[in-house]
Amino acid sequence: MAVASVVAGGVAWLWGLGHGYWATVSAASVLQVAGVSATWHRTVQRGVGTVVGAVVAVGVFALVDISSVWVVIALVVACQVGAELVVMTNYAYAIVCVTPLTLALSALARPGEGTFDLVVERTAATVLGAVVGLVVCVVVADRGARARLEGALVECERACARVSACGGAGCRHRLVEALGDVEAAVAVAVGEPAVSVPGERVERVRGRARALLDREPEPV
């Protein structure tokens, strides 16, 4: 994430973007998820959301006076509420709401800048940062994802064996943790195109662990 942020900020500065930190934030944002596949989806969502949000901002700014503090406050509140309502549905929807908010605040802070120039710069910086984040994610791939998945599966199999042997609360608790580690490792591994996930083995281990946890614990 640090590499992507520095690269995005540097490229934005070389391109002469006045709000280079937008590219930095964008690069860091798309890397908040695990794996290349998830980062790709987040990059597309951020790019599309920003473009649509910029178009919405142009329309809104043509209708209201964004030089007024009270108008900007009302717009910020409306956009923030909208983003909070839709962010769990789709990240792109939230970005559509966040983009007019950011542009309105920037226009208020720098009234001398043209609205159209701000919109173009916001779009360019955000797309630049998202693309840089994706490229860095591909180049700096998680090479240890398969090894961590293998280790998690082995540990879960051992925890299953301990529950089968004793069935105590401590053994069951460790199995719950081991199963959680497997799920986390699978989530990372499936996001790395270069990693082959042993699907049958994963399902077998999951099934055994869940069956043991569903079984009534032995009386103490």
Image (cartoon, rainbow, N blue to C red):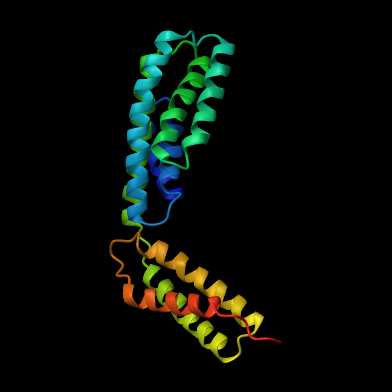
In the image, is 217 to the left or to the right of 56?
Answer: right
Residue lying at 52% horizontally and 35% vertically, measured from the top left: 84
Q: In the figure, is residue 183 to the left or right of 45?
A: right
For the residue pair 38 and 89, the one nearer the viewer reads as 89
Residue farthest toward the front in the current orientation of the protein: 216
Q: Residue at x 45, y 44 (%)?
A: 28
Residue 199 sits in which quadrant?
bottom left
Q: Is residue 198 visible?
A: no
Q: Is residue 55 visible?
A: yes
Numbered label tally:
0
Give the residue drawn at x 51%, y 35%: 85
In terms of depth relative to the viewer, which is nearer, 26 or 4?
A: 26
Residue 77 spot, x, y in % from top left: 56, 23
Q: Where is residue 34 in the image (x, y as percent from the top left)?
A: 42, 56
Q: Where is residue 164 in the image (x, y as percent from the top left)?
A: 54, 88
**Which is nearer the eye, 137 or 69?**
69
Residue drawn where x is 33% and y is 47% of the image: 41
Check the image and name the residue furthest to the bottom: 165
Is the C terminus in the top left, top right, bottom left or bottom right quadrant? Answer: bottom right
Q: x, y percentage for residue 119? A: 37, 21
Q: In this view, does 200 lie to the left or right of 83?
A: left
For residue 41, above or below residue 47: below
- Does residue 166 lie above or below 26 as drawn? below
